Image (tube, rainbow, N blue to C red):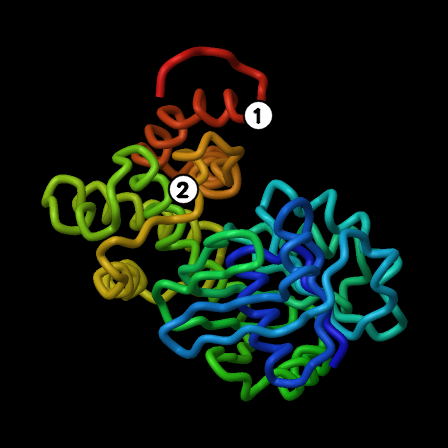
């Protein structure tokens, strides 16, 4: 299968590398020093599930790739609209497209720009990051990708992609007939953990061990659950408990990508996570006080990272 990975960071670099290792024709789209390292030295994956170093074609622009069978967008959520608008040269008659962004709005963005039946719903779970240019470090969580047709679409495209990609080393791949609920199940933990972790600047082991902080985290998860139910998402009543169980199993020194972006002064996915819960809550008349506080507390740092607000201090 010919696959283009748009955004070859911790997520895209890991899964793209594993699919290349399995024999697929993968091209990574990257920029800057990371792109230079991929071209010069290849891609290195460090993982408890097996180390590998391999040569994977790497390009900067879609025009250099050509038509592919599958496009996987693994950019930050705020980068998705611009990235999606530039896909044209890679889209052929049968190309399928899936976004693995944090949050719950990626499929809607893609479906607004591409034919509905060419867009797959998708979500992933992994803790990984660029350790240095050309090197991806996987530190925890079973690397999992879940795919499924969007509501109103036939499942043939999703089934074909699943059959092609199944079996790669170091990747658990699942096919879902209710991809919306799968995406929200991840949202249940990623939005609260990202918000609480960014405010406290503490790793997940500390957040879940300190009783008062753990209580705030659980309340934040419950708010996401309430919003999802109000939106008609099929979330079971055990969802909050399940999210906490997942969080309790994460390596104690783990941090979210949003937390690391705030630490490094980079633009973050705040709007796609706590910001989205605040927006959804206002639209649905669901009270979300914890996420409102997290969003307000982090917004000045986010605006500074975007260059629209100036102030000193950490």
Q: Position of residue 289 (x, y in %)?
A: 31, 32
Circles 1 and 2, Cβ within 8 Å, touching? The answer is no
Query: Looking at the image, is mark 1 or mark 2 nearer the viewer?
Result: 2
Q: CA distance from mark 1 to mark 2?
A: 16 Å
Mark 2 nearby-residue class (10 Å; few <14, some 14–19, many ≥20): some
Q: Nearer the viewer, residue 144 or 155?
A: 144
Q: Which residue is mark 1?
A: 306
Q: Considering only vertical position in the picture, is 276 above or below 152?
A: above
Disc number for residue 260: 2
Q: Is residue 281 visible?
A: no
Give the total of numbered labels: 2
Counting from the top left corner in percent of width and height, residue 80 is at: 67, 47
Q: Where is the N terminus found, in terms of image quarters?
A: bottom right
Q: Is residue 191 above or below residue 234?
A: above
Residue 229 vertical placement versus 261 (above, below): below
Q: Residue at x 28, y 58 (%)?
A: 240
Task: Name the image quarter holding the C terminus.
Answer: top left
């Amino acid at each position: 299968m010919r696959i283009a990975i748009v955004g070859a960071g911790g997520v895209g670099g890991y899964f793209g590398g594993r699919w290349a290792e399995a024999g697929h024709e993968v091209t990574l789209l990257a920029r800057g020093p990371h792109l230079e390292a991929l071209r010069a030295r290849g891609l290195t994956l460090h993982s408890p599930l097996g180390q590998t170093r391999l040569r994977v074609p790497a390009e900067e622009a879609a025009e250099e790739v050509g038509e592919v069978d599958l496009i996987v967008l693994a950019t930050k959520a705020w980068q998705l609209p611009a990235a999606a608008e530039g896909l044209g040269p890679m889209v052929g008659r049968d190309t399928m497209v899936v976004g693995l962004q944090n949050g719950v709005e990626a499929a809607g963005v893609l479906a607004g720009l591409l034919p509905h039946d060419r867009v797959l719903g998708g979500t992933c779970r992994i803790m990984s990051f660029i350790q240095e240019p050309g090197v991806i470090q996987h530190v925890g969580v079973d690397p999992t990708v879940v795919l499924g047709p969007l509501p109103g679409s036939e499942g043939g495209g999703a089934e074909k992609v699943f059959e092609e990609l199944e079996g790669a080393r170091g990747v658990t791949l699942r096919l879902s007939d209710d991809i919306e609920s799968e995406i929200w199940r991840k949202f249940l933990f990623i939005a609260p953990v990202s918000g609480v972790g960014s405010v406290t600047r503490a790793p997940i082991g500390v957040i879940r061990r300190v009783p008062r902080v753990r209580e705030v985290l659980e309340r934040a998860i419950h708010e996401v659950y309430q919003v999802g139910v109000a939106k008609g998402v099929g979330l079971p009543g055990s969802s909050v408990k399940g999210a906490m169980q997942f969080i309790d199993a994460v390596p104690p020194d783990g941090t979210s990508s949003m937390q690391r972006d705030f630490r490094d002064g980079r633009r973050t996915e705040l709007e796609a996570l706590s910001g989205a819960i605040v927006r959804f809550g206002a639209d649905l008349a669901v009270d979300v006080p914890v996420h409102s506080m997290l969003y307000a507390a982090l917004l000045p740092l986010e605006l500074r990272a975007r260059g629209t607000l100036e102030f000193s201090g950490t």
